[in-house]
Amino acid sequence: MLAVQGVSVAFGGVRALSEVTFEVPDGQVCGVIGPNGAGKTTLFDVVTGLRRPDAGRVRVGGEDMTGLSAVRRARGGVRRTFQRPQVFGRLTVADNVLAALDWRGGGGGLLADLGGWPARRRLERERRTRVAQVLELCGLTEVRDAYAAALPVGRRRLVELARALADRPRLLLLDEPTSGLDADQTARLAEVVAALDTTVLLVEHDMGFVMGACDRLVVLDLGRVIASGPPERVRDDPAVRAAYLG
Ligand SMILES: Nc1ncnc2c1ncn2[C@@H]1O[C@H](COP(=O)(O)OP(=O)(O)OP(=O)(O)O)[C@@H](O)[C@H]1O
């Protein structure tokens, strides 16, 4: 579970976030929406560890991550994707995912290689199985041997997602995942995200995507949570309508 508790951030006189509190239960997809300047990016930065809040806490699976750097959070199972998909263009799709798994690394040199050979072979099999699983989940099996650079942006986005999912993150953050995608690609991505069993927090402007992919929404306006809950309920909330209509 992700728990954001009483998070506040000010830039000089601007209160970018004011006592923001919400929770995302395990396995659910939560979308953060709100008009320009509402505080979405600042909240994302606080959860990923790029910015320390002036007050409040961020917990993932009960572990307090508030004071941890982005790198320490990544080691603790927090993964993110970027507005521009970050993939290795010169690697195949399958190798992109394999490289994400290799991140935890073995080490130990030649002796460890020789001594641990049977265990390493098993590990290698497990890794290949995991790559196949993740490619299937993201609808990438048919392009597994294509170079990532040769794929259209929608597919590259899915490769980035597959890389982020590879070693079973506790929390996955998606930063405007539909940017650069056409309507078909967006619909496909919504299906993939909705089918994940990972806890997801995403920031997104595309309402169609948000309504299709998210189990719950948190609506920010001027740094405050003005509504949260299932997408249909939030959509019909008068405070949300007023915030969007200005
Ligand atoms: N580094 C900064 N210095 C000063 N003010 C900032 C800084 N970053 C954000 N702000 C202000 O904090 C408020 C929230 O900004 P934030 O970027 O989090 O909103 P947002 O919801 O992501 O907006 P958008 O949808 O336009 O990306 C805004 O008033 C913004 O001008």
Image: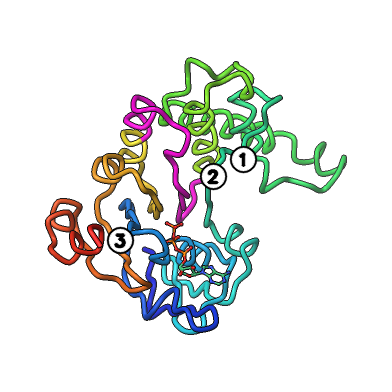
Label 3 SS: loop
The residue wearing badge 2 is 167
Q: Distance between the residues labelled 3 and 2?
A: 20 Å
Q: Position of residue 17 (x, y in %)?
A: 42, 75
User: Residue at the spot x=45%, y=55% of the render?
Assistant: 171
Q: Where is residue 26 in the image (x, y as percent from the top left)?
A: 33, 57
Residue 25 numbered mark, or none = 3
**Residue 174 counted in the magenta span:** yes
Q: Earlier in the sequence, mark 2 or mark 1?
A: 1
Q: Which amino acid does label 1 sit on?
A: Leu
Q: Position of residue 200 (x, y in %)?
A: 39, 52
Q: State which quarter of the image contains the C terminus.
A: bottom left
- Of the pair 100 and 56, the residue shown nearer to us: 56
Q: Which amino acid does label 2 sit on?
A: Asp
The residue wearing badge 1 is 101
For the residues bearing labels 2 and 1, Cβ distance under 8 angstroms: yes
Count of numbered circles in the view: 3
Image-quadrant location for residue 125: top right
Q: Position of residue 104 (x, y in %)?
A: 66, 48
Q: Earlier in the sequence, mark 3 or mark 2?
A: 3
